[in-house]
Amino acid sequence: MFGLEKREQDSSSDVPEKKRGLVRSLREGLRRTRESLLGGLTSLIPGGRPIDSATLDTVEECLLVADVGMEATEAIIGRLRERHRQQRIDDGDALYAALREEMVALLAPVARPLVVPADRRAPFVLLMVGVNGAGKTTTIGKLARQFRAQGLSVVLAAGDTFRAAAVEQLRIWGERLDVPVIAQATGADAASVIYDALAAATARGADVLIADTAGRLHTRENLMEELKKIRRVLGKLDPEAPHETMIVLDATTGQNGLAQAEQFRKAVGVSGIALTKMDGTAKGGIVFAIARRLGIPLRYVGVGEQSDDLRVFDAGEFVDALLDRGAGR
Ligand SMILES: Nc1nc2c(ncn2[C@@H]2O[C@H](COP(=O)(O)OP(=O)(O)O)[C@@H](O)[C@H]2O)c(=O)[nH]1
Ligand SMILES: [Mg+2]
């Protein structure tokens, strides 16, 4: 069977211990979505039983329940029905294999990891955006840790000057990771904080600057204006900055996240997505809707609150973790 094969491979092959641990934590993080997806499937598709059109209807329902969304579900199911018509799916295992293939194919175009180019003259500037509570500040801490582990020097900019606790939260991450945090008092002009931070990062010869931003001001328009201003002032120091504008989306908000991404994309442009809290939801199928509807590169997936709970998004690894029938449901 699919999942079992995969598990044996992992434990017996030469996959390094660390990598195996990461794959395990991705599986654990996707547990609730997997249960929702496979809960309806395994009982209906025992290996060897012929697949009929009703089975495919069940698959369709399971995808919709997991928040895969109408469009992505229809894309996947359409392809499966076509294969079934051609009699290339005759039992449960073949259906699983086909489903895996179609899912990976749908995600592959957005599985484009963030790459910090090695031949840089100036700091690589990462501007983090997203609504309050999405996980921006936490994701910044996790990213800073990953970059440090890659031997890159990092500076953080406390650009969420709206909430009193926001600067403090970033400072704590900075202390924990031994990464400098450039900040001013609550209420300061966010664009000026981030401008200063880029100047400081450049002076230090830092590799990466990660800028935090507010998720809410008095109105959504205020926020978008502030973000535009931040982009403008960064451009004065480095015409190519920000090199990445990453939106942080909370997976537990499901389809709502798609609307947020559209809003931010329209206002300030978005070049990448970090999808957080996959561990807290059965609606992780949202990744397929993101791939289908937005087509914005999905860089990272957050699977917990700890500093190492951030996975680089890999389509094959993700789908395997999602469909793994042997992974302790
Ligand atoms: N379970 C879980 N919680 C997360 C994840 N990412 C962030 N959080 C939590 O979400 C809450 C809001 O995060 P925060 O970084 O403050 O959001 P911000 O307002 O966008 O900066 C915090 O309690 C975080 O610990 C994740 O991947 N999984
Ligand atoms: Mg924050």
Image (cartoon, grey):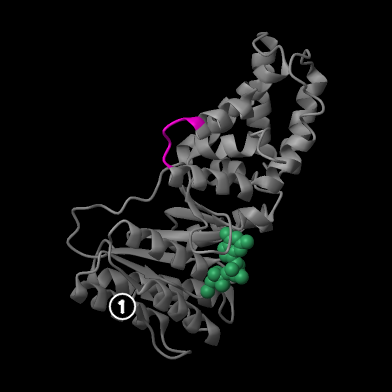
Q: At which x and y percent is residue 212?
A: 44, 72
Query: Which range of residues does the magenta coloring cover?
Result: 12-16
Residue occupying image coordinates x 81% and y 25%: 44
| Three-letter code, disc 1 | Ala
Of 193 and 179, the residue lying toward us? 179
Q: Is residue 299 above or below residue 327?
A: below
* Residue 100 visible here: yes
Q: Nearer the viewer, residue 162 or 313?
A: 313
- List the single residue furthest toward the front: 12
Q: Is residue 81 above or below residue 194?
A: above
If the image is split into quadrants, where does the N terminus sit? top right
Residue 137 inside the magenta-drawn segment: no
Residue 190 location in percent, x, y? Answer: 41, 81
Image vertical order of residue 227 relative to residue 110, above or below: below
Q: Is residue 315 left or right of residue 283?
A: left
Name the residue rendered at 31%, 75% in the picture: 233
